[in-house]
Image (spheres, helix red, strand yellow):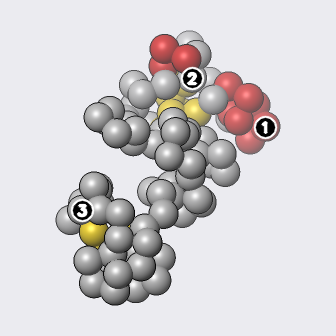
Amino acid sequence: MNGGRICGSCAVDNPSTAQFCMACGAKLRRSCPECGAPALPEARFCVACGTALQVDGEAAGPDAGLAAGLNIVHGAVVHPAVAHELGLAIAA
């Protein structure tokens, strides 16, 4: 079930709209699909790695943050400050 919510208790992939795991009943928490860090419901980007997060009714993808001045580095959306911290070159 690609794009679902992985249960932190039993690792079952649940539908993206699930609030509780369909296998074990544990409450599902939002997390970054790239690094697994916890994410607040209103977060548009992961605070740990900068990955664009899907917001209800909105698809995350390469263009998700470009209007906010973000950049694409090796196919990932990256905030300029994060790119600078990591020493990544930003293509114009």
Residue pictured at 59% horizontal, 60% vertical: 37
Residue where numbered disc 1 is placed: 85
Q: Quadrant of residue 25?
A: bottom left
Earlier residue among tags 2 and 3: 3
Residue at x 43%, y 72% (from the top left corner): 27
In x, y percent, where is residue 61? 37, 35
Q: Check disc 1: other Cα within 10 Å, few if <14, some if 14-19, many if 20+.
A: few
User: Would you place residue 86 above or below residue 9 in this image?
Assistant: above
Q: Where is mark 3, residue-wise? A: 15
Q: Amino acid at mark 1?
A: Glu
- The location of residue 36, given as percent across then percent down, is 54, 63
Q: Are marks 2 and 3 in contact (CB under 8 Å)?
A: no
Dot 3 amino acid type: Pro
Residue 51: tell me if it is visible: no
Q: Quote the CA–CA distance across marks 2 and 1.
A: 14 Å
Mark 3 or mark 1, which is nearer to you?
3
Q: CA distance from mark 3 to mark 1?
A: 35 Å
Q: Quadrant of residue 19?
A: bottom left
User: Which residue corresponds to mark 2?
Assistant: 70
In the rendered image, residue 49, in percent from the top left (x then y), is placed at: 63, 48
Provide the secondary structure element on which disc 3 rests: loop
